[in-house]
Image: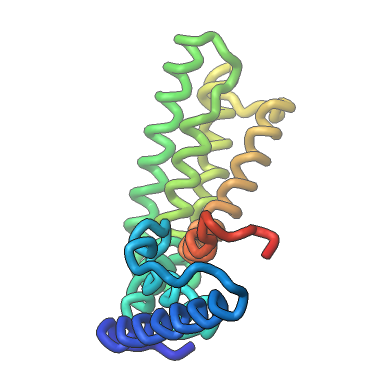
Amino acid sequence: MPFKSAARFSQLSSALGGVIIEHASKFAAEHQLPPMQAAGLDQMSTKIDDFAGELLMFGHDTWPESATSDETEITHEAAPSDVDPPRSVLPFIFVAFGSVLVSVPATMFLHALLDFPLPGIFYILTAITTALIFGSVHGLIVAAFNAAAHNLVVEPPALTFNVPSQSELYLFACCVTLVLLTPWIASHAAKWRNRLLAISPNHDLAG
């Protein structure tokens, strides 16, 4: 994947845009179409240079240097367990205990307020947040801590470990699934977003 400086990439985009306009004019002449109107190009939803730039990136795998820093930053934030593991266990311990201390009282309050059995939004949210910061493995540990704490404190009788109910098992399975999927989705979000944005609204998706 070759990378170009911003100035060089802009030059390439402009040059390719000129070639596209030239070939479009020849095509119009060969098929007895009206000649190219420069003023009409300003009404396009995607400018010629922008279209040429996307053609360079997604068609010829040639990218501006700014794409490298963006991808690196997203990768480190989205999947730190693979590329940038925490050097100390203390931050994770702080986050793990903090997650439990937040999720359990919040769940008890919501349970008392709504009289709904085991509302798990805070349970899942804290585990996903940990997974995004430290990675899926640490998120799974927090999910396990949350499950044990909720079983001990939230599920009656209090302060007694009970056989997990069906709703608890479903909640834990949902939490584990999201903890595993969310960092992976986040790490690929930039690539998918760029590809989706490359689909111009004036082009057929099937084409």
- Residue 103 to residue 194: above or below: above
Please say whether residue 137 is visible from this viewpoint: no
Query: Where's the C terminus, which quadrant?
Result: bottom right
**Residue at coordinates 69% horizontally, 26% vertically from top-left?**
167
Residue 123 image point, x, y percent? 50, 34
Q: Quadrant of residue 160?
A: top right
By what rule are the colours in the image chosen?
rainbow
**Residue drawn at (39%, 43%) of the image:** 97
| Residue 102: % across, % down | 38, 33
The residue lying toward the viewer, choosing from 5 and 91, is 5
Residue at the image position 49 percent from the left and 88 percent from the top: 1
Name which residue lies at 38% across and 66% down.
Answer: 47
Q: Is residue 153 left or right of residue 15?
A: right
Name above or below for residue 137 compared with residue 36.
above
Residue 199, quarter of the rendered image: bottom right
Vertical comparison of 2 with 14: above or below: below
